[in-house]
Amino acid sequence: MEIFRHDGVEFTAINAEFMNDGSLKISGHDMGPFVEKFWGDDDYEYWLFVPKESIHDFILNLLKYVFNNEKKITFSDCKKILEEKNISHSFDFWA
């Protein structure tokens, strides 16, 4: 399910889905001049995988973060929550 989309010169789409094994996959896709300047290609894809047994901890910490901030949450915020709270996850990317 697409949960965020920004169209324009700088494009971003964020999707979230539950996998067959019960894990949560949050994926992103960025395109545009900034991506090309940073990565040398105008296309960058990235993924967070949260195993089934870690989803509850992630969701509770995500809710705490959202309720205590006025800004929109980003993919990087999700990654930061997982890392800072030592919640089991994996990250990968393709550029």
Image (tube, grey):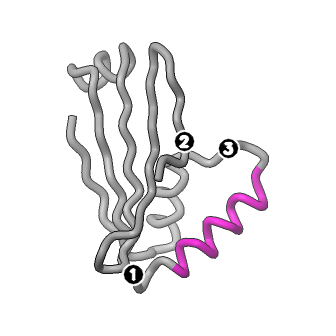
At label 2, the amino acid type is Phe
In what element is the residue under mark 2?
Answer: strand
- Judge depth for marks 1 and 3 and give the one in front: 1
Distance (Cα) linking label 2 and label 1:
23 Å
At label 3, the amino acid type is Lys
What residue is shown at x 54% (from left), y 48% (from top)? 3
- The span shown in magenta is 56-69
In what element is the residue under mark 1?
Answer: helix
Q: Are marks 1 and 3 in contact (CB under 8 Å)?
A: no
Per the image, the residue denoted by label 1 is 52
x and y, in percent, of residue 52 in the image? 39, 81
User: Is 60 rendered above or below residue 37?
Assistant: below
- Judge depth for marks 2 and 3 and give the one in front: 2
In what element is the residue under mark 3?
Answer: loop
Tell whether 70 sits left or right of 89: right
What residue is shown at x 36% (from left), y 37% (from top)? 29
Closer to us: 42 or 22: 22
- Classify residue 48 by image quadrant: bottom left
Distance (Cα) linking label 2 and label 3:
11 Å
x and y, in percent, of residue 72 in the image? 67, 44
Q: Which mark is residue 4?
A: 2
Q: Residues within 10 Å of mark 3 (few under 14, many from 20)?
A: few
x and y, in percent, of residue 74 in the image? 55, 45
Q: Which sits earlier in the primary sequence, circle 1 or circle 3?
A: 1
